[in-house]
Image (spheres, rainbow, N blue to C red):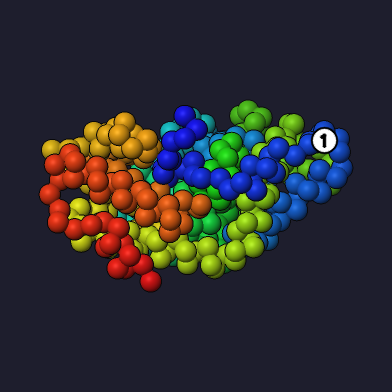
Amino acid sequence: MNNKIVYTPGPTDVKENVRLARAKKTTNPDIDKDFFDFYKNTCEKIGRVIKTKNDVYVLSGEGILGLEAACSSLTEKGDRVLVIDNGIFGRGFADFVTMYGGEAVLFSKEHTKDIDIEELKAFLDKDNDFKYATIVHCDTPTGVLNDLSKICPLLKEYNILTVVDSVAAMVGEEIKVDDWKIDIALGGSQKAISAPAGLTIVSISEDAKKAIKNRKTNVIGFYCNLGIWENYYERKWFPYTMPISDIFGLDKAIDNILDEGIQEVLDRHEKIASATRRALKDYGLELFLEKGYSNTVTGIKVPENIGSLKLSNYMLENYNTLVATSLGEYKEIILRIGHMGENARIEKIINILNTIDISLKELGFDSKENLVKLFNKYYK
């Protein structure tokens, strides 16, 4: 199991220094005041990465926890919530909204392209009575990237709070939480941050805090209530025992990003993603998206006579390589290349492209091209 080559859009590869950080001797995070300082410092470093002075929290739970916690904390019975849907996870926010008694109003568009800001503006001109809106930065099943720099400021013009799922984009794609007026930004440790799965990152604005405080009813539940985190540092009190080893690992992963340089990390993702897409098209494969490509995930349409599940199973059985198809209605159609975090390294992308090339040809795909040579042609 440990010898598999894993190249999926999260969890991604984890550097040795991150694994070693998780092996450090731990203290009692509930009562050791030094750990409160360590935790707060980790959160502040994350704030530097995502460009915010808002409070940042690290929650014990995989990224989905953050999505539900945001909806649980903001939603009261009867609240109208705009769910911006151009992907499986975008549409999925509606489940969390209705679960907590809200009315989900979907702005649904094609899953093959990013949200058109003019179409959204025309919609909002007719209907803008929403408490908050949800938007996915990069919808992982297809890799579509939405332009938060236009969407979130537009929503705020109508006094609509913004909840952003940036789990599959954060660190691999630029995010400027404060400049783009994002009220709640959500990330996950296991994607482009390249730490082990199990932690959610949340930044929360003063407007979002006020909305939670001014609720007429209490938040349903405890674990998904973002309000319980306020003033944790001043009180030296965590809502629950923190997974200290996981946070040691996350802290080191953030240090790796800061040491490399935030812009350098973004540039690395962009170069690899661009060369990958161009190589795949020259090779004879079709990209799933028409536009709105992310630098963290590329979805390719596998020819029907092969199918994505057959291709992924073949790569695992014959080359011990684990790649991911997609979800839902795209499971048999799309193969996803997760060039994010530590997977967005030249030696790793070349290896996976070589395996895809060989496997496709062995399964009968007709291409006279070499996928790695094409990638090298465009990687500049």
Mark 1 closeness class: few <14, some 14–19, many ≥20 residues within 10 Å: few
| Number of marks | 1
Name which residue type carries label 1: Thr
Residue 314 visible, this angle:
yes
Which quadrant does the C terminus fall into?
Answer: bottom left
Residue 126 visible, this angle:
no
Q: Is residue 304 above or below residue 146?
A: above
Observer-nearest residue: 119 or 76? 119
Query: Mark 1 = which residue?
Result: 27
State the image quarter where residue 146 is shown.
bottom left
Observer-nearest residue: 237 or 268? 268
Q: Residue furthest bottom?
A: 380
Residue 323 location in percent, x, y?
36, 40
Does 327 sit left or right of 201 as displayed? left
State the image quarter where residue 295 is shown.
bottom left
Does 335 sit left or right of 249 as displayed? left
Secondary structure of residue under mark 1: loop
State the image quarter where residue 313 is shown.
top left
- Residue at image position (18%, 45%) is 361
- Residue at image position (41%, 44%) is 7
Q: In this view, does 239 lie above or below 280?
A: above
Residue 3 location in percent, x, y?
47, 35
Does 366 sit left or right of 338 as displayed? left
Q: In this view, does 159 lie above or below 81?
A: below
- Residue at image position (23%, 57%) is 370
Residue 133 location in percent, x, y?
47, 49
Residue 350 location in percent, x, y?
37, 55
- Residue at image position (15%, 53%) is 367
